[in-house]
Image (cartoon, rainbow, N blue to C red):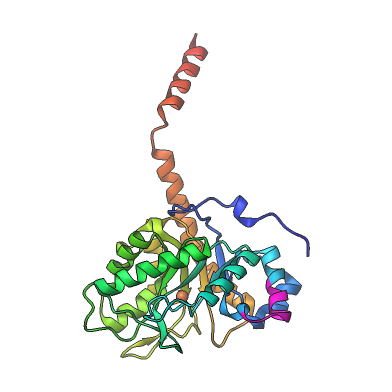
Amino acid sequence: MTRIPDPASRIPASRNRWGFPDLGIGIGLRTVHYPHILEQKPDVDFFEVLSENYMDTGGRPVWVLDQVAERYAVVLHGVSMNIGSADPLDRGHLAKLKALADRTRARWVSDHLCWTGVLGRNTHDLLPMPLTEEALRHVARRVKVVSDVLERPLMLENASTYAEFASSSMPEWEFFGRLMEEADCGMLLDVNNVYVSSFNHGFDPEAYVDAIDPARVTQYHLAGHTNKGTHIVDTHNDHVIDRVWELYQRSVRRTGNVSTLLEWDADIPALEVVHAEALKAGRYRREEEKSRREKDASKPAPSGARDRLRKDKVARVS
Ligand SMILES: [Fe+2]
């Protein structure tokens, strides 16, 4: 496969703290789509790779990943860093994650603000954090260690939650904001998860996205879910609902265009269907681009440019 120019080199940097590029609209790399991707090389802006699927394996999966990373921009997304746990950080896991990030030239590495197990047991669930001062200090310390080991800032995603701790003393958006300041990390803002958790716990999803520092948002997630009436389950098996698109639009107005990825993880349809759903984000991204250009055009020109303009006019008159 021939090497193509780095997609990031032709993409403007987002307004985020690290100048990470806006990669466009991506989808998750899923096994069922391997043949389509390898044979048809679809015009997808970037792929998100589930880190754990490639950390303890070789052979065909890693061969496919190498082909994908050769052609497309790749970001790594994990589910078992266990950043919120009281267990020691798994240094072996982090070393393998760093090796994978280096191998794929990952634009950034993300995991979830959650804990997945304790006392060495992995529940394979993204469990909610107690939103307390003590937990905040604990996670901030660990995020700094992880960033040092990975030699890149860590991006954390807000998980969908179904239970809360009675001991929590602040809303999740405040916990996130303070964590990102303290540990200098970024956010993968999953607007579907904001909506799911807001429904399950009864908070205002708009207040959540409005409270996030736009300079810390380096990626968006969108997904479908299953509404059970009394609660919502984050199933990633359907189209994105209108309320989530509205939330995305609201957040994009604050952050500007940021790399956006659609997650579809159960009952996965053909790649074209997943990609078409993801591309719906383009409508909001174009609106944002138009509004940014209009704002830029209405700004007064810098004084140097004004002086040059004046001299030019004088020269033409004389
Ligand atoms: Fe997500």
Q: What kind of secondary structure does the magenta stretch mostly adopt?
A: helix
> Can the viewer see residue 25?
yes
Of 171 and 207, the residue lying toward us: 171
Residue for point 38% across, 77% down? 84
Residue for point 70% across, 63% down? 71
Of 146 and 67, the residue lying toward us: 146
73 over 191 or under it: above or below: above
Report if residue 5 lies within the magenta region.
Answer: no
Report if residue 64 lies within the magenta region.
Answer: yes
165 over 279 or under it: above or below: below
Residue for point 51% across, 55% down? 20
Residue 276 position, x and y percent, is: 58, 72
Residue 3 position, x and y percent, is: 74, 59
199 over 299 or under it: above or below: below
- Please indicate whether residue 272 sits to the left or right of residue 287 in the image: right
Residue 73, image quadrant = bottom right
Residue for point 47% across, 22% down? 309
> Can the viewer see residue 205?
no
What range of the chain is rendered magenta? Answer: 56-65
Residue 255 position, x and y percent, is: 40, 57
Residue 145 position, x and y percent, is: 44, 66
